[in-house]
Image (cartoon, grey):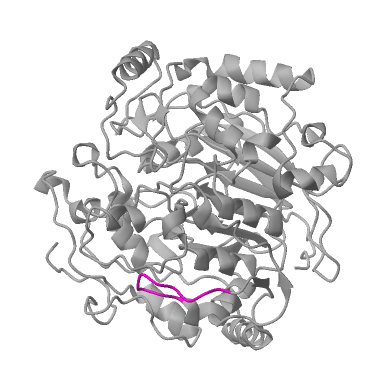
Amino acid sequence: MQQPTQGPGERKKFTVAIEGCCHGELDNIYATLAHLEKVEGRKVDLLICCGDFQAVRNMDDLETMSCPVKYRDIMTFYKYYSGEKLAAVPTLFIGGNHEATNYLWELHYGGWAAPNIYFLGYAGAVRFGGHRIAGLSGTYVAQHYHMGHHEKLPYDERAVKSAYHVRQLHVHRLMQLQQPTSIFLSHDWPNLITRYGNSRWLFSKKPYFQKEAERGDLGSPPNQQLLEVLQPDYWFSAHLHVKFPAVVPHRQQQQGQQQQQQQQSPDNGQKATRFLALDKCLPGRDFLQVVELDVQGPLELCYDAEWLAVLRSTHQLMSTSRTAPPLPDTRTGPKPEDMAFVEQLLQQRGSSSIPNNFAPTAPAYDPAAGRSRGNMPRADLRNPQTEALLAMLQLPYNLDHAANSSGAGRAWVNRPAAAATGGGTAYRAPLNLLSQQQGNPEEIDINSDDSDGQPAAAAGAAAAAAADTFEIPLDDDEDDDAAAGVEGAGGALADGAPDSDNEAAAAAAAAAAEAGSSEAPQQQGQLAAAAAGTGQQPSDLDDPMFGRVNTSEFPYYNS
């Protein structure tokens, strides 16, 4: 995309704030941004949240979220959905493993979850400031990867979990993107990413990650694929509740592939992706990061033309049954006729701006009604935004489950609460994913009590949490200060170190990196081969990384 000519007084940079796991803490996150502007004079133009957003409108939505009943909380999103509050900053988010799945299904291809708060979709790409921001919602579990989206309301205990697991179709769609990607978002980490950062520090803080990392299965293989192929400038993740930076070097793009605007390593100019995982929103935790990008387009959320063309080219591959059609192993980009259709469409519209067409489809939570348990919704709803997008692309609606549709989409009005792209370059097959361990080793199973099978670890974690004056419990047994089972892996998590030592740990890690004592990653997999192809060890590409935002000094309003 050609950068617009800068006139006198026009901005040349814009600021993006990235937040880790949201867990419904919107009031506190926006208060943090306001404090950042007041103290440092940094006004944020866009907020990005990396999953576990918890866009819960009412108590019924809570029934569709994978979380033990005793830990369910309405949190604060409903205030923004109802119009009681307006998001102070345009907000973009992806889904994680704790979401109101029924609501996100309505916005499967992306849409406004509330005024000024946009869901990127199960997979998606948009533009802001002229930069592509792409992302993948959910977490990876091998046995569901090749399935269709068969989960329909009312969800049973299995469906409420498998509904948020990544499907191959969404990865295939993202693989078709040919134009440069500035920022990519995922909830869980790419596989092997720990080999490109200070893993010694990570394992000292989270020792239960080490065995999975050494086996090569800490992270998502599909995310690893996307990282290798798309080579974004930045990749942000969350999920594991710890800040972890890394620099991933890349091999040269294949000839004939469109040249990317290179995010250069400061050492040798090699193309590299700066990866950063962030914590959850708690006092003193590293849950926020700020970056600046060049202004190359309007500072508003806009459609990504190539992504819309990909949706048209792959629409027939969507499945709402257990089986899904086989997908080609080619990376061709969208069909030329679909790209031409979208370009003409956007030209006729006169703008690529995403319309502000939010419309509520369910009642918002009423605090006066109390916090009694809701009822599992019985049927899928059609969201008018999704219908409008598909109509614009001249595509049929394809999200209904058999005999379980609520009919035509419309805004809620005082209702009671209750094709393969042929040819092209082949991308690497999905690592025979079904032969991988049947589960996501870093996904924390919150369907088991903290202390199940680990009473000593739980007691130690509780003592550590009590010693941390900054810690405010979220009352979920996914908390990284408690012991819990790992979904599908049978492992145990126990972190006895309080997080009030974040400053000291970060300083020690920085000193170790400066002294050249960071652990050299093992050269395995295609990511490591990228460094080997240049004669560089990944550790030779050490980078100043991201500046620290000291959230321990920010106000935190326990709402």
Q: Does residue 464 sit above or below 45 in this rendering?
A: above
Q: Quadrant of the N terminus?
A: bottom right
In this picture, residue 341 sits left or right of residue 460 = right
In this picture, residue 84 sits left or right of residue 135 = left
Residue drawn at point x = 28 percent, y = 24 percent? 451
Residue drawn at point x = 59 percent, y = 74 percent? 352
Which quadrant holds residue 313?
A: bottom right
Residue drawn at point x = 32 percent, y = 58 percent? 101
Residue 276 in percent (x, y) is at: 61, 39
Which is nearer the eye, 300 or 291? Answer: 291
Residue 425 in percent (x, y) is at: 74, 72
In this picture, residue 22 sits left or right of residue 174 = left
Residue 552 in percent (x, y) is at: 49, 22
Q: Does residue 359 sit above or below 470 in this rendering?
A: below
Counting labels gives 0
Residue 433 in percent (x, y) is at: 54, 56
Q: Quadrant of the C terminus?
A: top left
Boundaries of the magenta span: 318-327
